[in-house]
Image: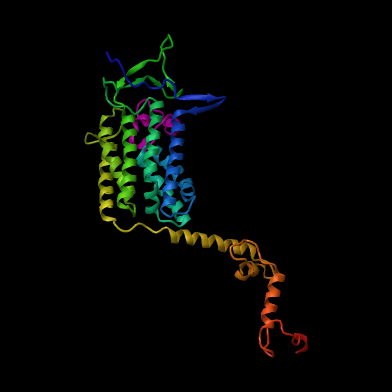
Amino acid sequence: MLLASIPSPTQGVWFLGPIPLRGYALCIIAGIILAVWIGEKRWVSRGGEPGAVLDISMWAVPFGIIGGRLYHVISSPDLYFGEGGNVLDAVKIWEGGLGIWGAIALGGVGAWIGCRRKGVPLPAFADAVAPGIAVAQAVGRLGNWFNNELYGSALEAPWALTIYRWDAGLGQAIRDSTGEPLVLGTFHPTFLYELLWNLGVAALVVWADRRFTLSRGRAFALYVAAYCAGRVWIEALRIDPAETILGLRLNIWTSILLFLAAVAWFVTHRGPREDLTPHRRKRSATAAGDDGDDDGGGDDGDNGDNGDADDQVAGSPFERPRDDLRTAEDELASDQPAGRPTRHAAGPKPADL
């Protein structure tokens, strides 16, 4: 008899009035927030424009969620299209089920769109957000724990995970007539293995990036390769339904192929780190030009006065009074030799010419 094990929650959803609060969704949201925050700090430290990561994530996150769900449905079709499956369950993302490779693939498309709109290089952006993505995955795995899912083969050990018979629709454990949750068994806590592995991957990428000044997408490639190396052995422990090819789960084949592609990218894309300052200056100049266009509609040359450096006191945002300018010019004119025309010397008016 197993004396100790890791407990699982018996409830994965709570209600705030009529509003359901799902543990899985809260973990995903928390992971996204952490990823954006970490990515923003790294992006700015590399010379990038503040706020760019948040702006680009507005494209990447929705694309990533859709891609993650599509990959999950494709890699586990029997759950939705097989015998006893319900096609409508494929859209119930709140019940769990996001495939990381689909999230990265379509999320990458969204990031590419966002980078194009912001005028920043995608590889540099990917390098900045790579550790944050790994941390987000780690936090997201806690959502699997709330849903009593993503576990491995049976295990009797102190770190074994207790899994309950689960009602995914209600988001809670099935109970017997006495109200006690029905225990399915104890299993490998693969969600925990991957959580810890992802935190290690994030630490590895940060260390290698500082030690070797990674650039041109190499930090992101290191993240992909390191994650895949762990995903292969963790995936081999899982027993949930999945598509198989030649006896191996689809996710294992995907991880192997992406590991090789990531290593190839890491080896071949060497070079100095991208200088993000020109992109930042270009955006600042564009914004300044737009502001100038908005203020330049007057007939009396208001935009010219605002753009004249002589009208500004050095080191101050305030304009120098016009009377002071005229006084200074008159003093300069009085010092010039007699007979030499000055800007304010008396002369015939245009009407007298």
Q: In the image, what residue occupies the spot 31% across and 51% down?
A: 218
Does the segment drawn in magenta span residue 194?
no
Above or below, 177 against 319 in this view is above
Above or below, 319 against 204 in this view is below
Above or below, 144 against 316 in this view is above
Does the segment drawn in magenta span residue 95?
yes
Q: Residue furthest right?
A: 352
Give the quarter of the figure containing the C terminus: bottom right
Locate residue 83, reporting x and y percent: 35, 26
Q: Quadrant of residue 233?
A: top left
Please give left or right for residue 36 compared with residue 7 in the image: right
User: Magenta stretch?
Assistant: 70-98
Locate residue 166, reporting x and y percent: 39, 21
Locate residue 210, reporting x and y percent: 33, 49
Q: In the image, what residue occupies the spot 47% across and 25% down?
A: 13
Depth order, front residue of 352/66: 352
Q: Quadrant of residue 270?
A: bottom left
Q: In the image, what residue occupies the spot 72% across and 71% down?
A: 323
Q: Quadrant of residue 100?
A: top left
Q: In the image, what residue occupies the spot 31% across and 38% down?
A: 200
Evaluate whether residue 109 shows in this view.
yes
Q: What kind of secondary structure does the magenta stretch mostly adopt?
A: helix
Q: Residue furthest left?
A: 246
Give the quarter of the figure containing the N terminus: top left
